Image (spheres, helix red, strand yellow):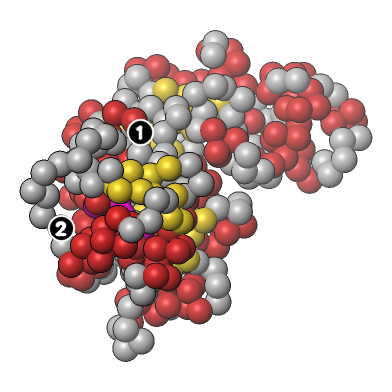
């Protein structure tokens, strides 16, 4: 992207009454951001949904001056600008009507052909919430997902630290410019995250971490991934906003249930109760519902291992499958008297041990 193209995109992004939806409409009609500023206002007003209030500040020269200053920051700090029509712009976010026209990236982010999941939750995460989050990422690591979160206290940083521990790419979506770190105590994680992922934001270097920015940021967390997982949440909170946005984008939402007496589980329990989220009680619920399959180079060798130790549930399923040629997951759950979510996890463990193999159509057989 040339500096001239970027200056006009920045200037358009800086016009206060032109949001992302309107900006995309104007770009679609005029062909480019620069053409919008060169078009006569009476012609722009003929575009469906464009009113004079939106355009009243369009030709204010301060927007181009501000854009030039921000461009200087971008070039001096090796920030990568991502235009919503660029091939490197996050693919799923392209399909969100209110996705930002411009994103700013730092680090080594690579989202091409990757599984992306967002993990959110309360900043006051409990010890059991931490344990579940860490277990979740540990067991999903074999699928190499990119872990998206907000780099905030509690659930966010727990998920991103766990991703780093298991050598998974992780992306922090920020509510401020790339010239600062919030919260400051998390500065210690910035370099490591940028080596194995990085940060995304729609905010300029002049933007501070204000409350409305966090709410706006949530749509990026929800829109960039195929599923949003809520670990813990009180009755109200930003993670519930993210879950609602994910639902509006027709993305899967998962919520970890908790006791009715636990205040930090109220939000998750309500998501499940009102059928706004899948109940997540086992990490393997995620690949089962999202229909993930292991990559060929991560599947166990197709040969029977001798002297493999099986857990009690694994023995039950193994003995059942020995008497059958091939069986559906649902049939295994029914015949072995186990819930489907549990069977999905047990089958994955058995696959990794090399005693069974998956077949097309969600069939399984003993090796």
Q: Residues within 10 Å of mark 2 (few under 14, many from 20)?
A: some
Residue farthest to the front, as pictured:
323
Give the position of the C terminus as an image quadrant: top left
The answer to whether residue 211 of the structure is visible from this angle is no
Q: Secondary structure at mark 1?
A: loop
Identify the residue under disc 2. Answer: 310
Q: Horizontal and vertical percent for residue 212?
A: 49, 56
Q: Is residue 55 left or right of residue 332?
A: right
What residue appears at the point 29 percent right and 28 percent down from the top-left corner?
Answer: 297
Q: Horizontal and vertical percent for residue 120?
A: 37, 58
Give the mark nearest the N terminus, 1 or 2: 1
Distance CA(mark 1)–CA(mark 2): 24 Å
Residue in front for this viewpoint, 262 or 80? 262
Q: Nearer the viewer, mark 1 or mark 2?
A: 2
Picture quarter containing residue 205? top left
> Which residues are drawn in magenta?
344-349
Magenta span dominant secondary structure = helix
């Amino acid at each position: 992207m040339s500096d001239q193209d970027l200056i006009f995109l920045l200037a358009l992004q800086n016009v206060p009454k032109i949001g992302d939806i309107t900006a995309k409409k104007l770009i679609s009609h005029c062909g480019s951001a620069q053409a919008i500023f060169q078009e006569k206002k009476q012609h722009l007003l003929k575009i469906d949904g464009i009113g004079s209030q939106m355009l009243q500040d369009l030709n204010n020269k301060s927007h181009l001056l501000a854009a030039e200053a921000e461009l200087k920051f971008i070039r001096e700090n090796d920030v990568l600008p991502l235009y919503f029509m660029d091939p490197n712009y996050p693919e799923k976010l392209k399909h969100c009507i209110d996705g930002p026209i411009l994103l700013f990236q730092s680090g080594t982010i690579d989202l091409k052909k990757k599984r992306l999941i967002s993990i959110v939750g309360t900043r006051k995460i409990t010890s059991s919430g931490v344990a579940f989050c860490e277990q979740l990422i540990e067991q999903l690591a074999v699928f190499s997902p990119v872990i998206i979160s907000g780099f905030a206290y509690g659930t966010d940083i727990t998920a991103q630290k766990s991703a780093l521990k298991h050598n998974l790419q992780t992306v922090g979506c920020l509510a401020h410019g790339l010239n600062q770190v919030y919260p400051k105590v998390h500065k210690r994680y910035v370099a490591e995250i940028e080596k194995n992922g990085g940060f995304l934001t729609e905010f300029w270097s002049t933007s501070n971490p204000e409350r409305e920015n966090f709410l706006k940021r949530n749509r990026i967390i929800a829109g960039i991934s195929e599923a949003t997982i809520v670990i813990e949440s009180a009755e109200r909170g930003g993670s519930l906003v993210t879950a609602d946005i994910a639902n509006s984008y027709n993305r899967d939402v998962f919520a970890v249930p908790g006791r009715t007496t636990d205040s930090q589980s109220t939000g998750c329990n309500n998501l499940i109760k009102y059928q706004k989220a899948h109940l997540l009680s086992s990490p393997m619920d995620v690949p089962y519902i999202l229909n993930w399959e292991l990559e060929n180079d991560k599947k166990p060798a197709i040969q029977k291992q001798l002297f493999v130790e099986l857990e009690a549930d694994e023995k039950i399923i193994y003995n059942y499958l020995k008497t059958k040629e091939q069986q559906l997951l649902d049939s295994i759950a029914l015949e072995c008297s186990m819930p489907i979510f549990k069977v999905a996890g047990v089958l994955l463990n058995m696959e990794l041990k090399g005693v069974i193999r998956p077949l097309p159509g969600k069939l399984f057989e003993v090796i």
